[in-house]
Image (cartoon, rainbow, N blue to C red):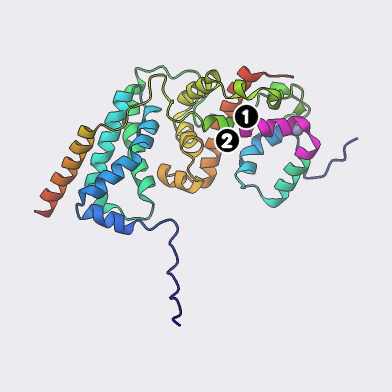
Amino acid sequence: MRVLFRRDIECQQFVELITDYLEGALPRGLVKAVDRHIAACPDCTEYLAQMRRTIQITGHIDGQIKGEPPPQPLPDEMLDALQKAFEEFHNSAGA
Amino acid sequence: MSVPLPLPPRPLPPDESSFVERLRKGDSRAFRELVTLHQASLIRLASSFVPSNAVAEEVVQETWIAVIRGIDKFEQRSTLKTWITRILVNIARTKGVKERRTVPMGSLLSDTADHAAVSPDRFSGPPGRGEWSQPPARWSELPEEVVLSGATIALVIDTVRLLPEQQKWVVMLRDVEDWSSSDVCDALGLTEGNQRVLLHRGRSTLRSMLEGRLGVAS
Ligand SMILES: [Zn+2]
């Protein structure tokens, strides 16, 4: 039988605390309670691994965020046009 | 024998003020550098909030024009990167409001709705303090090529696009663009606490969508 500490947390609480836990934003007492829970609970250990995986997979979506082909690098003529806008603004502001 | 002079401490984050000064003086080389450095990330961000790459390009163009006009008023209380992104966020939001009427936004919850990370049905025991009755599957046992397959990535892309707007900004900046939480708070005008709530909801939704694909129970 598991001994419950007064500050013990259960699985359903863990899934709501997980982001604060990963962000290092939990008070120390709760960090200990979470650590204790994970150590004793293989399901929440897996949940934590899933959340880390989720973050990792999300980090892979850059450059393919749309279903269509990724945007092309800025064409020179657009860069030139922006530079012209920049120069015109400065000439008119400085004049 | 001469004693080497101590080197001045290297400022962290790198000092941008001389670069900003060049921009203010109208140095167009500096401006080109700035555009080249940030363009890809701005396009990527914008295109997840508006319906097409064409509109995303418009948003980014308008952002650069606003940067040109506003650089004199930039007070350097944040980095150039977060300041530029804040401008982009505002322009994309304005455009997004116009486009939203024509784009069905799916059934995902709003930013303010109270929302459990995992359905209460999957726990048994006292409400709010339950233990898993339908525990998460063991993704760790799945082959890497399934976890990181094109279909998995596509699912994440679709889910991110359907997140409520504020959650989407936070997830995009934190987990896709890899920004720090303080930069995200700065660019979006959020408190640290709010930012974490939005991140939590966004990530929890993504995890649960992935679970639907990668397996619920073992
Ligand atoms: Zn648990």
Quarter that holds the C terminus of chain B:
top right
Amino acid under disc 2 = His
Whether the residues at callouts 1 and 2 have beta carbons within 8 Å, the answer is: yes
Please give the name of the residue rendered at 34% of the width and 42% of the height, measured from the top-left corner: B37
Whether residue B128 appears in this view of the structure is no
Which mark is drawn over residue B200? Answer: 2
Picture coordinates of residue B84, whole percent (x, y)? 33, 44
Mark 2 burial class by Cα count in 10 Å: few <14, some 14-19, many 20+:
many
Question: Which residue sits furthest left?
Answer: A95
Image quadrant assignment for residue B145: top right
Range of residues picked out in magenta:
A38-53
> Label 1's element?
loop
Please give the name of the residue rendered at 82% of the width and 44% of the height, measured from the top-left corner: A5
**Placement of B2 over or under A67, stated as above or below:** below
Q: Residue B174 or B7: which is nearer the viewer?
A: B7
Decide if residue B166 is on the left or right side of residue B42: right
Mark 1 burial class by Cα count in 10 Å: few <14, some 14-19, many 20+:
many
Q: Does the magenta stretch include residue B130?
A: no
Quarter that holds the N terminus of chain B:
bottom left
Please give the name of the residue rendered at 43% of the width and 47% of the height, measured from the top-left corner: B186
Main SS, magenta region, reads helix
Whether residue B85 appears in this view of the structure is yes
Picture coordinates of residue B8, whole percent (x, y)? 42, 69
Picture coordinates of residue B46, whole percent (x, y)? 36, 31
**Mark 1 / mark 2, whichever is N-terminal:** 1
Disc 1 target residue: B117
Chain assignment, label 1: B
